[in-house]
Amino acid sequence: MIGLILLILPAILWSMGGLLIKSVQATPMAIAGLRSLLAIPVLLVLLRPHPLSFSRDQLLGAVFYCGTVSLFVAANKMTTAANAILLQYTAPVYVAILSITLLHEPIHRTDWASIGLALFGMGLFFLDRLSTAHLWGNLMAILSGVSFGLMVVFLRRQKQAFPLVSIILGNLLTAVISCPFWIGVQIDSTSWRYLIVLGIFQLGLSYALYSIAICRVSAIEAIMVPVIEPILNPLWVWIFLREVPGRWAIPGGVLVIAASVLCSLGRMKNGRPEGIKTAG
């Protein structure tokens, strides 16, 4: 149960991303780099002494983390927030396939049903606002989804280790790669406030919680429970910008939440894969 709660909290924090990213007046790579730079101190505070193994899983987890956060920022700047979040959350399909081949965690019929239900629900939720324009932004969002799925798998492969190290390395890699875009850039005070929230809470704290949760749940749960993020994302836009959701938003949102519940209940019924921590 604690593992599921630790997945819900990051999803709430992640859901603020679209609104905050669009509010920062800077290039996508500058935002991605500064956000990661601000997240690193938060993550280091939580890092207990743990040696860098530089294992393949640790390094690949860092690389795919970097791809996830960088591509998602680019997608939000190059296409609509709805497109960016919806296309990123094609990730459960990749996780389901890779769970079988790389993690040897079984995927049950309820898992596939929950994935289908979630994708259908998100389709309904964004039905009135999906756009085929902004081709490159949509492509960035799709690639972000691929990176997200791979990141989940390689973090999960470190279930007996300390996945937070991959996340710290991933943020460091993002900050270094984007150096030419943020060093010397003039950013106004309002944008800095949004960046601080993005770095400390929306990225740093959220992934700290996620790194703990992923040791306690299966890979498919680690990607299915946070699908509430695409529902919360436009909710913040509605609250703060008064952008009214489409008429299909409520039924779509209900289906997505039902998919998360179905996935969790199915895992409880079928049992958790070997190696998942159940205490605490």
Image (cartoon, rainbow, N blue to C red):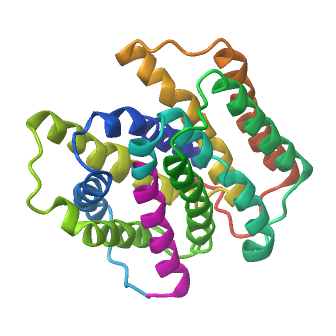
Please give left or right for residue 122 compared with residue 48 in the image: right
Residue 233 against residue 100 in the figure, above or below: above
Q: Main secondary structure of the magenta part?
A: helix
Please give left or right for residue 63 compared with residue 37 in the image: right
Which residue: 52% across, 28% down?
232
User: Where residue 188 sits: x, y (%)?
Assistant: 10, 39
Which residue: 50% across, 25% down?
234
Residue 224 against residue 67 in the figure, above or below: above
Please state the total of marks drawn on the protein image.
Answer: 0
The quarter of the picture where the N terminus appears is top right
Q: Which residues are magenta?
A: 54-73
Res. 218 visible in picture: no
Res. 43 visible in picture: yes
Residue 89 against residue 233 in the figure, above or below: below
User: Where residue 113 sits: x, y (%)?
Assistant: 86, 42
Residue 55 counted in the magenta span: yes
Residue 269 counted in the magenta span: no
- As drawn, which residue projects farthest toward the right? 109
Choose top left, top right, bottom left or bottom right for residue 56. bottom right
User: Where residue 89 sits: x, y (%)?
Assistant: 62, 46
User: Where residue 231 sits: x, y (%)?
Assistant: 58, 29
Please tell me which residue lies in front, 220 or 195: 195
Please tell me which residue lies in front, 27 or 221: 27
Choose top left, top right, bottom left or bottom right for residue 57. bottom right
Choose top left, top right, bottom left or bottom right for residue 110. top right
Please give left or right for residue 261 compared with residue 227 in the image: right
Which residue: 37% across, 84% down?
51
Which residue: 67% across, 25% down?
127
